[in-house]
Image: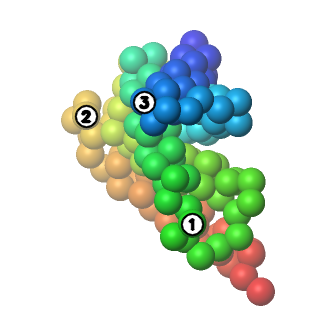
């Protein structure tokens, strides 16, 4: 449920922002669901569907505006992969520290910061920084 809901939320969010700005594009309509899926992937087995919608919405809005301003970033990302997957994944991983509920996954789950366990957010931040360091080390050269 969470992955389908997040993909749909990403699509609708992207198309609504595009419509407000005066142009709806097919490529944007394809990116919206991808952003929703990327963002909800870390959390999909640990959050309620409502949180999955919020995760996808927040990530899609932020990534949309990052892509609008990518010309200010001085790196080669012709297909927007770094922004869509990198930033979308970072946002999703961070929000996984906020919204999970142990009741969703009683065997492997844990409560997040909004449910009385703020240390989970710090675990997520440590994981994000580790992944960034690993990716930087593997791609430096």
Which residue, given by chain and number where applicable, does mark 3 sit on?
Answer: 20
Residue in view at x 55 percent, y 71 percent:
73
Left or right position of 18 against 48: right
- Cα distance between the residues tagged 1 and 3: 21 Å
Foreground mark, 1 or 2, reads 1
The residue most toward the left is: 116
Disc number for residue 114: 2
Q: Give the class, few, some or many, for how many residues have Cα within 10 Å of label 2's Cα (few <14, many ≥20).
A: some
- Cα distance between the residues tagged 1 and 2: 36 Å
Secondary element under disc 3, as helix, strand or loop, is helix
Observer-nearest residue: 72 or 3?
72
Q: Residue 54's quadrant in the figure? A: top left
Foreground mark, 2 or 3, reads 3
Left or right position of 81 against 129: right
Measuring from the top left, give residue 26's x and y in whole percent.
Answer: 70, 30
Left or right position of 125 against 112: right
Disc number for residue 71: 1
């Amino acid at each position: 449920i969470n992955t389908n809901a997040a993909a749909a939320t990403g699509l609708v969010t992207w198309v609504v922002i595009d419509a407000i700005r005066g142009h709806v594009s097919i490529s944007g309509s394809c990116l919206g669901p991808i952003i929703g899926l990327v963002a909800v992937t870390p959390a999909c087995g640990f959050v309620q569907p409502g949180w999955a919608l919020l995760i996808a919405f927040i990530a899609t809005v932020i990534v949309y505006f990052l892509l609008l301003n990518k010309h200010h970033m001085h790196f080669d990302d012709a297909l927007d992969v770094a922004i869509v997957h990198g930033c979308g994944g970072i946002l999703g991983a961070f929000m996984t520290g906020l919204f999970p509920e142990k009741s969703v996954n009683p065997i492997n789950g844990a409560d997040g910061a909004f449910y009385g366990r703020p240390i989970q957010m710090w675990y997520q931040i440590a994981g994000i920084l580790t992944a960034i360091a690993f990716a930087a080390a593997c791609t430096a050269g």
